[in-house]
Amino acid sequence: MKKLILIFSFLTCISVITFSCRKDKKTEEVSKITWTKYTTADGLVNNDAQAIAIDSVGHIWVGTDVGASEFDGVNWKSYAGIGQRVLAIVIDKQGNKWFGTDSGGVMKLEGNTMSFFKHDANSTNSIVSNHVSSIAIDKQGNKWFGTASGVAIFDDVNWVTYNVQDGLASNNVYSISIDKQGNKWFGTGGGVSKFDGTKWTNYSYKSDKTKGIVGNFVMGISIDNQDRKWFATWNGISEFNGTQWVAHDTETEWLVAGSPVLSTASDSKGNKWFGSNGWGISAYNGLTWTTYTTANGSKIDPVSAIAIDAKGNKWFATRSGLLKLNDGN
């Protein structure tokens, strides 16, 4: 039975953030920083958070190791009946929630009704794999799923699959983003693939970081308000404006959140946010980096996903719960 649990949040304000790169140290004063952490003690179904999405009324949806939770700002509702590790969540224009799971394919929550979409080896019209790690929805309402066997597209009736034979860089697809022109960008185990609806273009690792992506394992993609693409990889961060590549890594900049970088998001002011595999969270305003290695005095665990709400609050899915950052922006 779904339970509503009143949350009790522990808030702590901090005024000074200290961060360093691997060669030097830098201290920056930051005011009005408030962290809030939510765990199973508050109502989250499981502390190992993997995915986040925010619906049209501001409810936070969190995918975890054993299902999903919905948070309306006061109460939690859990969907443990999903019975799967939820790796991705997206919400369509009708308010339906789509969940990508570790081994159970795709689940769709429409009101209180759950539908399941799984791979069927005996059918030519099913999702290509039950391991779904990323989801995006285009302007036409088509759902794009990143799987362990390529990209699956669903128009609510038919399934289409793209893989390396079609031009995809790798069949392991970890992240998807869609730009203003409708181009689909896929972060894979073999670099980045761009699909314009007809043509595939692949970008792979180059030793000259100005000519290609900094690493081939691309875990996250975000697109900022200037249509620049930001790629979170196992080797650092790459920025791409359509013609030029810029590498942002722990050896050359004030980026403390070391590699691997697992997630990224861009806020409405153009700030870029990156979650690392245990090194903390970094923000980049185009000139300087700010990194948070602790929240409320506790080390920030690996950050699998980032979402930003309408008020500018940043939400981070971590291995030890859900973090909310109010940084005054």
Image (cartoon, grey):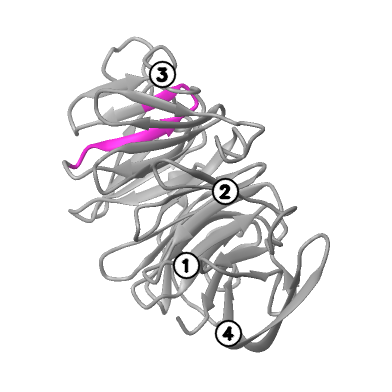
Q: Which residue is mark 3?
A: 163
Q: Which residue is mark 2?
A: 65
| Marks 2 and 1, the one that precedes in the sequence | 2
x and y, in percent, of residue 35 in the image: 59, 79
Identify the magenta region: 141-151
Please tell me which residue lies in front, 23 or 38. Answer: 23
Q: Quadrant of the N terminus?
A: bottom left
C-alpha gap between disc 4 and disc 3 = 44 Å
Q: Nearer the viewer, mark 1 or mark 3?
A: 1
Return the residue found at the far right.
Answer: 23
Q: Quadrant of residue 253?
A: bottom right
x and y, in percent, of residue 319 in the image: 64, 56
Q: Quadrant of residue 139?
A: top left
Q: Nearer the viewer, mark 2 or mark 4?
A: 4
Amino acid type assigned to the residue bearing label 1 in the image:
Asn
| Marks 1 and 3, the one that precedes in the sequence | 3
Tell me the tag on residue 271.
1
Task: Assess whether residue 146 is covered by the magenta stretch.
Answer: yes
Q: Which residue is mark 4?
A: 33
| Disc 3, SS | loop
Residue shown at 43% from the left, 52% from the top: 222
| Disc 2, SS | loop
Magenta span: predominant SS is strand
Other residues around mark 2 within 10 Å, as few (<14) / some (14–19) / many (≥20): many
x and y, in percent, of residue 153 in the image: 29, 29
Amino acid type assigned to the residue bearing label 4 in the image:
Ile
